[in-house]
Amino acid sequence: MFKDKKAAESKAIDAKNLDKTFEVQYMSRWRLILRAFRRHRLGRVALVVLLIFYILAIFADFFSPQNPFTLKNQNTFSPPTKVYSEYKGEKVAPYVLPIVGVRDPVTYRKTYYDASIIENISITDDSDKSVNLILGENGLNSIIPVISTTEYAIGDKGELKLKSTNESMELIPLKDEDIFSGTGSVIHITEKSELDKYTSNPVYSYKLKKIGELQEIKLSRSISELKLVYESGEKESVKVKTVENFDFKLFTIKWFVNSWEYKLLGFIPMNMHLYGVDEPASFYIFGADRYGRDLWSRILFGSRVSLSVGFLGILISFTLAMFFGGIAGYFGGWKDELIMRVCEILMAIPGLYLLLSLRAILPEEMPSTTMYMMIIVILSFISWPGMSRVLRGMVLSLKQREYVEAARAMGYPSGRIIWKHVIPNTTTYIIVAGSLSIPGYILGEASLSFLGFGIKEPDASWGLLLSQAMDLNVLQNNPWLLLPGVFLFFAILGFNLLGDAIRDAFDPKALGH
Amino acid sequence: MLKYVLRRLMLSIPVLFGVSILSFIIIQAAPGDFLDQFRMNPAFSAERVDAMVQEFGFDKPIVVQYFNWLFQVLKGNWGLSFQYHQPVFNLIWQRLNSTLFLSLSTLLISWGIGIPLGIYAALRQYRAGDQIASVVAFIGLSIPNFFFGLLFLFMSAKTGWFPIGGMQSLNHADLGFFGQMGDYLKHVIGPAVTLGFSGMAGIMRQMRGQFLDQLSQDYVEFARAKGMPRKIVVYKHALRNAINPIVTMFGFVLSGLLGGAVITEQVFNWPGMGKLIIEALKAQDIFLVMASLLLSSLLLIIGNLIADLLLAAVDPRIRLRYR
């Protein structure tokens, strides 16, 4: 029994080996390469991740909830929007709320509070008549409450009314909800520093003396009036005595919404987006940048630059490398000397130094597409010498082969021999070296843009987006600005893993040869 | 040996000459020149600007300008920085020290951690330690160093463990000698770790691969078969052979260091060569750009030479040829 099991096992192994020999002998080279690639699990994961990245980049407009170029300065550095799914204790569809920012007068930093507009409200007006208002009904476009604030000073010898102001507030911070309650909201200010502001104010200081020592300031805020705006442009106002009941508008997250217009793939006019919320709310899943633009949308648009430089870069630099490497290796002599010396000089300057100096040749301001092309050209220019040298060495050995001799004997022109007979034999190296060098291009572009020498505002690139985080004060308060770096990291990691998998797949040992 | 070094240095002269021509062409091709800002400035009269043109020789043909510069350099005069109104050589000398300090610290971190980690990973192939080390290496190879630098800065700003950029504390001058050294060390940790992380990852992976290759060689098996203790076989025989290819990486590492330092210095506000060249390029400070390009190339050439010499030192099979 035990013996049988062992025999069966060894039989299975034999069959496996036979399969392997069969595959190695009879499968085509490309199928073997594909087979070797499939075995590389990490490589496959990387391929899937990169494909997702590319789909996001190609359809960036569709996946962007907001136009990455429209400024919303009122939302500068807004943190990632909170998603709620509960309202007044009940479960509702996921929604977000608009925000209002309050700037701290000392640190000049904005703090954001959730706010919303009134969706429906039932009130008793000044003639004790009950009024029920619902947004959207009877062409009602907006309900703007007017909040009246009265300041009272309370001293040890009595009370004094300081001033009373009316202010219409379209967006009401959720924390001020109690304005709508029966008595309105009352805020007591007792901090010494705040009180001093009143006593030292020349407008009040005389009055305040009458009530002795100032003990507290009472702010009484209540709703006095509702301004109604109709679709027809008509306006009306209703005096409010008491608020019976009201609801905030919830900005439910909608799928496949129609908002800002774009051209899908550059030519199909569309305005559909994967998700979005109604104005005035904005849904920032990754927060906003300095100008209140949605960081996620900008990351998507930036990925177009970062993910395409690699391919275009290797296209140019390999063409250059094949051309010069081929000439140098095939002809030898002074051509070889000249090309190799030039390569040596280019390689003698540290890469980024050369990159920056070459960038300095170009004018500061250029149309964004020109700038993008120029960056690719520069990146290719600094990376061709290395590949040229390797290709030259390969050509040098390939030209000794019989088939090249034969081609020469048949009187083919040199250019044809190089392109048709010699270079095709370096394909493996070109594919492997190419896939391994893509991260270099991505990094090069990101570094240039990061240093302010590459893609410029208002265009987006991952390096440029990350440069906003260079200011440590900004970074400390808005850590989500580091997110473009995370994307950059995963793209580079993906290409590194994919490159490794491709190299292993092309390795003759893995093919079983 | 000396003959070899001299020969290599002689050979690098044409390369440096080429670098100088290339950088001169680059800087001349750039739009506008340094004097533009004076031409725009109403406080400077046209005559004054003309006088400056004469002084710096901008009115002469480019070829003449180049040879003027070259002769001055050969005499040891690297020219004057327009921007800082200081001799270029002094300026670069200060920055070179801090860049070298940063580079050496980086090398210490990347090699000091990378090699032992690689050895450790190779000896425990496919076990948990090896897997973790491989993941760390892949992260290190993929993380852009400016992103890592920002993360590091963010961490130090939140925790206060490390200074946030610069090379000295505000009270640097008041510290004693050891205090000052400690201050420098504290400041260099951030940029050095940032720069060294990717280098460490590369060296660790290379070391692991080479060591595994060596461990599977016949001579290792033979030494074990004849009864040599495992420790001696592994550390004395296999390791020495595995280290050699790592030494050749030194040249690449140096190139990466000089390039990567440009961004890291910018992020950490480290007063090094990289930051200098960015400022010089922005201000079109011709002589400064030329000198820093030339000096960085020289550093690279020297680095490669050191790598070759090191290789000859560690591998007795390699003889430096004088041809």
Image (tube, coloured by chain):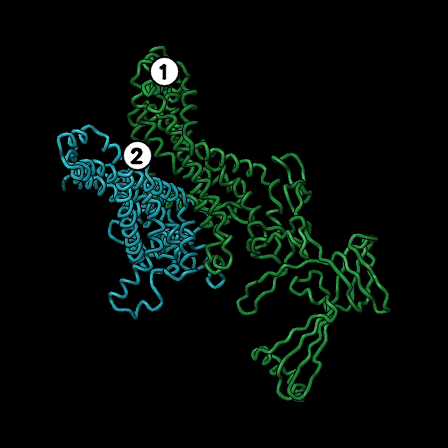
Rendered location of residue B9, percent (x, y) = 21, 41
Three-letter code, disc 1:
Leu
Residue A180 visible from this viewpoint? yes
Left or right of A2: which side holds A86?
right
A108 vs A322: above or below: below
**Mark seen at residue B310:** none
Rendered location of residue B196, percent (x, y) = 33, 48
User: B188 and B113: which one is in front?
Assistant: B113
* Chain letter of disc 1 in the image: A
A318 vs B243: above or below: above
User: A3 and B218: which one is in front?
Assistant: A3
Left or right of B83: which side holds A125?
right
Left or right of B315: which side holds A22?
right
Quarter of the figure with residue A237: bottom right
Quarter of the figure with residue B165: bottom left
User: B110 and B43: which one is in front?
Assistant: B110
What residue do we see at 28% from left, 25% from top?
Answer: A333
Q: Which residue is denoted by mark 2 in the rendering?
A: A341
Q: Colour of chain B?
A: cyan
**Mark seen at residue A18:** 1
Quarter of the figure with residue A7: top left
Rendered location of residue B298, percent (x, y) = 27, 45
Q: Colour of chain A?
A: green
Left or right of B308: which side holds A377?
right
Q: Secondary structure at mark 1?
A: helix
A215 vs A35: above or below: below
What residue do we see at 32% from left, 36% from top?
Answer: B126
Q: Residues within 10 Å of mark 1 (few under 14, many from 20)?
A: few
What residue do we see at 47% from left, 64% from top?
Answer: B43
Three-letter code, disc 2:
Arg
User: B44 and A206: which one is in front?
Assistant: A206
